[in-house]
Structures are given as C-alpha cells and as structure tokens.
Amino acid sequence: MSLLKTLGVTTAIAAMLMAGTAFAAPVKIALVVKSLGNGFFDAANKGAEEAAKELGDVQIIYTGPTKATAEAQIEVINSLIAQKVDAIAISANDPDALVPALKKAMERGITVVSFDSGVAKEGRQLHLNPSGIDLIGDTIIKLAADHLPDGGDVAILSAASTATNQNAWIEAAKKVLPTKYPKIKLVSVVYGDDDSAKSTDQAKGLIKSDPNLKAIIAPTTVGVVAAAQVVTDENLIGKINVTGLALPSEFKKFIDNGASQGVALWNPIDLGYSATYLAYDLAVKKEKAEPGATLSIGRVGKVTLDQDNSAAMANPFVFDKSNIEQYAKIY
Ligand code: RAM
C-alpha cells in the first residue's frame, strides 16, 4: 500500500472514530450542589434527570460535598475536571472562592454555569436565578409582616454565611425594611450552614436571646424546617411564626400544626431542569452566553441574559393552609 493510501485510510478511520465518539458518548453534565442530603437539591436533580431524558444523550452526575462549604466544593470541582466532564452546573457556597477552580475547568473546555446560588462573573459562563433577588428579599419579610399588624422583633436564620443567594436576599430584605415595613425590627441574622443540627442550635439561640421574638425568617429549606421543629418542641406555636423558603413536601406538617402561617418557594424541579438545559446547549455549542441573548429552556420557555450574563426565572409561590397539600405531592 502506498504511503498516501495508508495515510488516507488512517485519516478516514480517525474521522470515523471521532464521529463515533461525538455521537455515541453522552454529554456528561455534573450538577454540583451546596451539599448532599438536601431535599431541595434532590428535587432539582429530578429536573436535571428529566432534561437529560428529553435531550437524549446526557449523563447527569449529581454530586456535592457533605458539608456546605466552598473548600469542599473545590475538591468536587477538581475531581470533575480530572474526570473530564463536559459541563458543570453549580450552586455555590461562596461567590469568589470557587472562581480559580472553575476558571481552570473552563480553560480545559468544560462549560460552567451556576444556578440557584451564583458564582462571580469570571468563574462561570452564565448564572440562573430562580427568581428576582429583590422580589425574594421583599417576599421573605412580607411573609412575616403580613401576620404582624402591630410589628415586632424578627430574626433571620440563614444558610452558610458565605452563600451567594441567601446573602443577596438578606441585603434586599434589609433595603426594603425601613420604608415598606417600618414596624418590623430585624434583631439578628444567624447562620445554620444548611445543616440541620447547627440550624436547630441557632434557632434555639435566637429564641433564648429575645423573649419578644415574633417571627423567625429562614430563607433556606433546611433552616426553616429546623426552626419550625424547635418552635413546635418548645410549645411556642402561636407565639413565634416560622417563615421563609420551604419545600412543601418537607414543611407541610408545620403549616398543619400552626408553627408556620405560610412560606414561599419556586419550583426546584424546573430550576434543575433549566440549569441542565442551559449547560447542555452551551456545551454542545447550540447557544452562546452573552448579554442580551435569549436562550430556550425546553418546556420551561425562555430566559434572557442581562449585562452580567445572569437571568431570573419565575416569581416565587406562597404556600399556606389553602394550597400546601397539593404542592407537597410534587416537591
Ligand atoms: C436551601 C439552599 C438553597 C436555597 C433553598 C431555598 O435548600 O440553601 O440554595 O435556594 O434553601
């Protein structure tokens, strides 16, 4: 066989193999969450799996650390880089600390998007917020204020002290407090790290330190359950209203027993579905993340990226006695 012919055959085989790889191998998308064992992220993973099924050639790697810290997430990211995943969709425990690891991922050709809790602009291609930050900030205060016509002391039990999303919502809440809710006094903000035991201790501490406390606002699905359990156990139902952001399936019992008058959230399944869809479209180069771009997200519709390549989905829903049962069956 002449050299030319040999080269031709080799090239043809290489091309066939490459085409084979491109079509046969699934697109590996890692859904990296703040911490495992959190029902909110399990629901988001359901949505990710739904998107994967719809897209056809996607493998979801649902992963995250056991504790909601940035250091632990960096380890997860480094291992995903070594595994050569195609995309990472991450909910961040810190906006800045993850940037170097995620930059490294992008330099290796891995698509990086953040969802739920964002990464600073340099560390991701786009960020997907579940809803508008100001709207969530206002909603969490309103949920407490609506049941306090005479005002009173409220406290916030948050997730990790570095969590991008909770910190942004708390800032937004503080902004509207003096003008929209002048009779509501925010006495303290504490952090339970999305850890059930720590959140329980923090809720107990809030109650102990302020005998006039009227509401605990926990903008975290983990913290809100812990706080409502403490209020129930300490026979404070009717005295302290627990509110914030809660997963209906986990929280229904506290609406039923009166520890809470109502909570809010968005659909976490849709959030995971959308994050996966966007990560896929960027990874296969179907879409480009740039300011002003309108991106399709399957059955959820479309989002438009702002100047920071961020987008927000729908308004939060409020759950109370009238509707929680119906939502608790879904997520
Ligand atoms: C917890 C997490 C998550 C947040 C929800 C509301 O599960 O902190 O990031 O979006 O609460």
Image (spheres, rainbow, N blue to C red):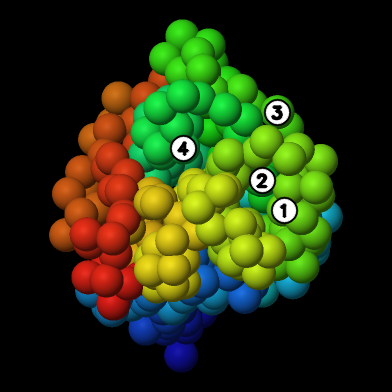
Report the residue marked by disc 4: 144
Name the secondary structure under disc 1: helix
Q: Which residue is mark 1?
A: 203
What kind of residue is marked 1?
Answer: Ala
Q: Dot 2: few (<14), some (14–19), or many (≥20) neighbours within 10 Å?
A: many
Q: Which residue is mark 2?
A: 157
**Count of numbered labels shown in the rendering:** 4
Q: Which dot, 2 or 3, sits closer to the camera?
A: 3
- N-term mark: 2 or 3: 2
Q: Amino acid at mark 2?
A: Leu
The Cα–Cα distance between marks 4 and 1, rounded to whole angstroms, is: 16 Å
Tell me how far mark 1 sits from mark 3, CA to CA: 13 Å
Position above or below: 310 against 32: above
- Precedes in sequence: disc 4 or disc 1: 4
Of the two numbered discs 2 and 4 in the rendering, the one whose residue sits closer to the viewer: 4
Q: Position of residue 301 (x, y in %)?
A: 17, 49
- The reply, left or right, for residue 326 in relation to residue 69 is left
Q: Residue 63 in the image: state x and y as whole percent.
A: 61, 72
Does the Cβ of the disc 3 residue fall within 8 Å of ligand 1? no
**Which residue corresponds to the image point at 31% horizontal and 48% vertical from the top-left?**
318
* Residue in view at x 46 percent, y 24 percent: 150
Labels 2 and 1 touching (C-beta < 8 A): yes
Between the residue at mark 2 and the residue at mark 1, the CA separation in whole angstroms equals 7 Å
Pick the residue in front: 271 or 19: 271
| Residue that numbered label 3 is attached to | 187
Q: Which residue is situated farthest in the top direction here?
A: 179
* Residue in view at x 66 percent, y 45 percent: 157
Locate the C terminus and report the quarter of the image it occupies: bottom left
Judge left or right: residue 321 versus residue 228. left
